[in-house]
Image (spheres, helix red, strand yellow):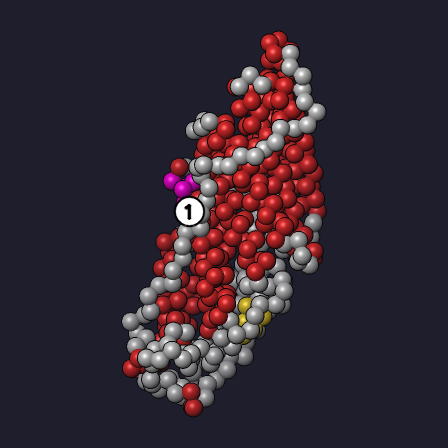
Amino acid sequence: MAHWFHRNPLKATAPVSFNFYGVAGSPAANKICNDLRTTRARLLEMFTDITCNPEIMKNATDAYFSLLQGFIMPLDGTTQENKMRFIQNFKWTDTLQGNTPSAQQDAVFELVSMAFNVAIWYTKFASRMAGKENVSETEAKDVHRSLKVAAGIFKNLKDVHIPRLITPAEKGRDLEPRVIDAYIIQCQAEAQEVTIARAIELKHNATIIAALAFETANFYQKADHTLNTLEPECSSKWRKYLQLKQLFYMAYAYCYHGQTLLASDKCGEAIRSLQEAEKCYSRAESLCKEYRQTKGPGTTAKPSEQLFFLKLGGLIKMTLEKCQRENGFIYFHKVPAEPPQLDMKASYGLAEPVPFELPPLSEQCTPEVYATFDLTKGAKNDKVHTKSVI
């Protein structure tokens, strides 16, 4: 497979002690606080642990979120806000805004920020696996599923949890609609890249591959347009990636559509389709250089030197030369001035987000234990600096 994906950095956060001296009025309440601190620290460690896999990540995520929900869900038999929701301040940076943190005294803010980082981890895990030269079928499935899981987490946060925040997200921050929509669409597009690679490997019908490539290019274009009103200094590099991938998959679509036209004895149209593929590929190559030179959040790479990029260039050249030979010997068709219209709908392989659900509430968080938290006693605030987990 040997794919390359742009990745923005993980969010960073400040340590949280959950030391509610006096407020936690029972041993069971104190244990919940201690377990919140340790499970949070454990989850943060997993973000940068190279040995972490999706199973370990899910276990670490469930352990923390099952406890954190005890500070969010109503536990007193009423529909009122959980009295513990606003007791602790949480600080998080954003993937596009450098080291400047946002802070909210809200457990829902902690939930969405941490879950956002979990989704970013899944995309980074997928990128690491997909970048290998020899990716097994099992590993390809892991890449594909991880990207759809990430999309599902982002979508769940956008639809369910972010609307619950008392303080709405500022412009350009991770939790605002434009940014989170771009992440969702990018994950779907990258998952479809895996499908396309698999279809090519198994020599599926060129029509299927062209349609999938066209749909994937449209996804990348949609993601880019979603970000076009963000400040350039924080989004330019990301947008260069989305633009070059859009052109790259348009080149794929025209290349395989050209193969379909040749098989239908439409050699002149096939040549024009391959010529358009060459144009898209050349423009994508130029954007690869611009991407490399653009400053901003994200990985530093030379995409035009990646194997996946070079292989397409060779395929377009070889297919075009074949069409031109066939036309010179057999068909003698006139090459149209305009490229063929690509109005294809993929029937197979479109990636849908995997629905995300929070784990069940921890058995430790009972109404009886909840009643022993006494807010009138006051709590000790954490005065700490933002700690990077990148």
The residue drawn where x is 38% and y is 57% is 58
Give the residues in magenta.
138-142
Instruction: Say if 266 sits above or below 65 in the image.
Output: above
Closer to the camera, 324 or 28? Answer: 324
- Left or right: where 295 falls relative to 381: right
Using the rendered image of the protein, determine whether residue 265 is visible from the camera's viewpoint: yes
What amino acid type should be assigned to the residue bearing mark 1? Arg
> Residue 251 in magenta?
no
Residue position marked by numbered label 1 in the rendering: 145
The residue drawn where x is 59% and y is 49% is 223
Instruction: Say if 327 sits above or below 37 in the image.
Output: above
Kindly indicate the quadrant of the structure image that contains residue 254: top right
Q: Residues within 10 Å of mark 1 (few under 14, many from 20)?
A: many
Kindly indicate the quadrant of the structure image that contains residue 321: top right
Closer to the camera, 64 or 213? Answer: 213
Residue 196 on image: x %, y %: 49, 35
Residue 108 on image: x %, y %: 47, 71
Quadrant of the rendering where the C terminus is positioned: bottom right
> Residue 141 in magenta?
yes
Q: Main SS of the magenta segment?
A: helix
- Left or right: where 53 falls relative to 388: left
Kindly indicate the quadrant of the structure image that contains residue 69: bottom left
Instruction: Say if 294 sits above or below 170 in the image.
Output: above
Residue 382 on image: x %, y %: 51, 79
Using the rendered image of the protein, determine whether residue 34 is visible from the camera's viewpoint: no
The residue drawn where x is 56% and y is 70% is 168
